[in-house]
Every structure is written in structure tokens, then in C-alpha cells.
Image (tube, rainbow, N blue to C red):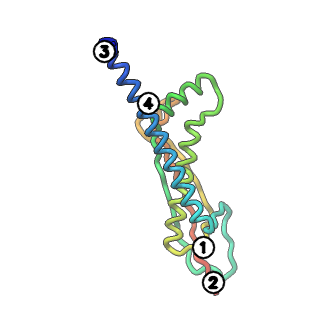
Amino acid sequence: MLEAVLGNLDIFLFLLFVVMGYSCGTIAEKRHYKSILKREKELIKLMLVSAEGRFADGAVNESFLVSGSMVVSNDYFKRLLAILRNFFGGRVKAYESLIDRARREAMLRMKEEAAARGAHMIVNLRLETSTIGRSANKKNRVGSIEALAYGTAVVMNRP
């Protein structure tokens, strides 16, 4: 029995590292989503709209540009799932979660910057996403995903 284990030690180590990598990635993603949900609840009252802001004369005390960005790296397990999904067709949920996390985190960072500077709302929100990294320009490959959120923070004159 021991000889069989030692003879196939490389396979056992490979499987061990695969399980550990998948587990660590899943735990890290769940922690990040938990953090996102907590911070979204804290900043729910800071209004965020994609429409252009039009205000009455004297209603705005100050306005300034705010932005937030996030880069999320693709792991090998998500890449493997995406390759299989591309082969069989259908939604690529592995990449959807990457984009969702990056977008939400970028908007949260933007809101946190606005809140720290006393803004009451953010208008004219814009979101951009892009792929970056060594494999970003190769066909059907994604290295990392960047999300950039920016808009105009507005501090209102309040009586």
C-alpha cells in the first residue's frame, strides 16, 4: 500500500494542490462578497444615478470628480470552467462573478471617496470594464478584469 502511494505521490500532490487552490479561491470570493454586502448597506443612502444632474441655482455647494477602480485576477479554476463552457456553449458564470465583484467594488470605492468628502449624491455615473494582463489580447483568454467607476459627487446646500 505504501509503495502504491509513494509511486503515485505526484498525482496525490497534484490533487491536493488542486483541492487546496479551489477551496482557498472559493473562501476568498465568499469573504469579498460578504465585505461588499456590508459596505453596500452602509452606503445605501448615498444616491448614485447615471443621469446628468440638473439643479436649481444655488442648490449645489460643491461638485467634484470621484472614481473607484478594481482589478480582479482570473484563477485557473475559473479559466478551466470558462474553457469548458466555451466548448459546450452557454453562460460563463465564472467570468460573470469576476465582473460583478469588480464592478460592485469599484462603485463602492467611488462612493466611499464621495462620502469621505461630504457628498450627498453622485450623478452622471459611468462604468468601464477592460481586460488586462499578458493574455488579455490573445483569443478567448482573460488575464484580469478591471472595472472603473467615475462620476460627479455633489454637495448640496442644506438649510
x 66%, y 63%: residue: 49
Identify the secondary structure beneath mark 2.
loop
Cα–Cα gap, marks 4 and 2: 56 Å
Residue type beneath disc 3: Leu
Indicate the quadrant where residue 154 lies: bottom right
Q: Nearer the viewer, mark 1 or mark 4?
A: 4
Where, quadrant-wise, is the N terminus in this rendering? top left
Work out which residue is located at the far front of the displayed protein and give it.
Answer: 1
How far is disc 3 from disc 4 in space, using C-alphas?
A: 22 Å
Image quadrant occupied by the C terminus: bottom right
Left or right: where 128 falls relative to 17: right
Q: Is residue 87 above or below residue 64?
A: above
Point 47% across, 38% down: residue: 74
Label 1, secondary structure: give it. loop
Q: CA distance from mark 2 to mark 1?
A: 10 Å
Mark 1 Cα-neighbour bin, 10 Å: few <14, some 14–19, many ≥20: some
Q: Which residue is mark 1?
A: 120
Q: Residue at x 56, y 78 (%)?
A: 62
Please say whether residue 128 is visible from this viewpoint.
yes
Kindly state the secondary structure of the residue where label 4 is placed: helix
C-alpha separation, residue under disc 1 versus residue under disc 4: 46 Å
Q: Earlier in the sequence, mark 4 or mark 2?
A: 4
| Residue type beneath disc 2 | Arg
Local crowd size for mark 2, using a 10 Å CA cut-off: few (<14), some (14–19), many (≥20): few
**Which residue corresponds to mark 2?**
158
Q: Residue at x 37, y 19 (%)?
A: 11
Q: Nearer the viewer, mark 3 or mark 4?
A: 3
Earlier along the polypeptide chain: callout 1 or callout 4? Answer: 4
Of residues 145 and 138, the one nearer the viewer is: 145
Task: Indicate which disc residue 2 carries.
Answer: 3
Q: Is residue 105 left or right of residue 133?
A: right
Secondary structure beneath disc 3?
helix
